[in-house]
Image (tube, rainbow, N blue to C red):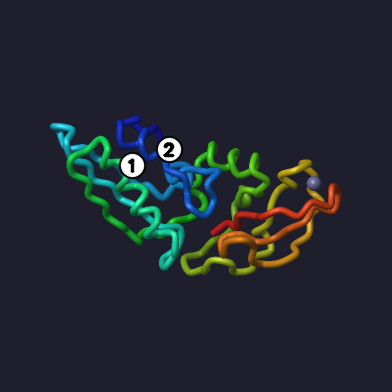
């Protein structure tokens, strides 16, 4: 998908996700659309939070508004819950940024997500591909929930480093 880099997209690319500041709200895939009025004075943004009831949603709304109000006279933010956000919406840049910050990105292998698998559901294929520290594939899960509900805690059997895994959902 080629996105036209409007001013709005460029401004939002600098807004970090409050839970994982290593990636922007754009790379996280929660900004679904950015539409400018023809005169460039107003902007309409559609956000889809990572999961409904995510406590970070209000923070994100506030940060997105603040980032846009410096440029636009009128900022309208719409929160859309359907279709639900999925980790497949993470950009390649977002996946790389996660790995650089020691968090394993969601599994790339296709798995049958179905329509109703809630965050954190166990799934045998829902596991990191490799250790974000050393790249080894010999990994073990320590805990199904890590520093955020979206993450699980894993450890590399090769370098022994524990790391967060951004669960696919
Ligand atoms: Zn390792």
> Is the N terminus in the top left, top right, bottom left or bottom right quadrant?
top left
Along the viewing direction, whichever of 50 and 168 lies nearer the viewer: 50
Residue at (26%, 52%) from the top-left corner? 77
Where is residue 100, by image quadrant?
top right
- In the picture as drawn, the residue positioned furthest to the left comes out as 39
Residue contact at pointers 1 and 2, CB within 8 angstroms: yes
Label 2, on which residue?
14
**Is 130 located above or below residue 113 in the figure?**
above
**Is 117 located above or below residue 40 in the figure?**
below
- Left or right of residue 104: residue 51: left
Disc sitting over residue 88 in the figure: none
Residue at (42%, 37%) from the top-left corner? 13
Question: Cα distance, mark 1 to mark 2?
Answer: 8 Å
Residue at (84%, 52%) from the top-left corner? 160
Looking at the rendered structure, the secondary structure element under dot 1 is helix
> Is the C terminus in the top left, top right, bottom left or bottom right quadrant?
bottom right
The response on whether ligand 1 sits within 8 Å of label 2 is no
Image location (x, y in percent) of residue 166: 60, 54
Where is residue 132, by image quadrant?
top right
Image location (x, y in percent) of residue 72: 22, 38
Circle 2 packing at 10 Å, graded few (<14), some (14-19), many (20+), is some
- In the picture as drawn, the residue positioned furthest to the right comes out as 158
Label 1, on which residue?
67
N-term-proximal mark, 1 vs 2: 2
Residue at (60%, 38%) from the top-left corner? 96
Circle 1 packing at 10 Å, graded few (<14), some (14-19), many (20+), is some
Looking at the rendered structure, the secondary structure element under dot 2 is loop
- Left or right of residue 31: residue 144: right
Image location (x, y in percent) of residue 88: 51, 49
- Left or right of residue 94: residue 156: right
Image location (x, y in percent) of residue 32: 35, 47
Along the viewing direction, whichever of 142 and 90 lies nearer the viewer: 142
């Amino acid at each position: 998908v080629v996105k036209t880099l409007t001013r709005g997209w460029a401004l939002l690319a600098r807004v970090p996700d409050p839970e994982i500041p290593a990636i922007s709200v754009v790379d996280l895939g929660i900004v679904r659309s950015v539409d400018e009025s023809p005169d460039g004075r107003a902007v309409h943004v559609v956000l889809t939070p990572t999961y409904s009831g995510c406590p970070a949603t209000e923070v994100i709304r506030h940060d997105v508004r603040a980032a846009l109000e410096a440029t636009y006279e009128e900022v309208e933010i719409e929160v859309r819950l359907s279709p639900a956000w999925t980790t497949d919406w993470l950009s390649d840049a977002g996946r790389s940024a996660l790995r650089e910050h020691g968090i394993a990105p969601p599994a790339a292998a296709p798995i049958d997500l179905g329509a109703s698998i809630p965050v954190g559901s166990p799934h045998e294929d829902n596991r990191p591909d490799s250790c974000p520290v050393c790249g080894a594939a010999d990994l073990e899960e320590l805990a199904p929930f890590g520093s955020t509900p979206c993450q699980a805690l894993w450890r590399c059997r090769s370098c022994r480093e524990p790391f967060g895994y951004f669960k696919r959902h």
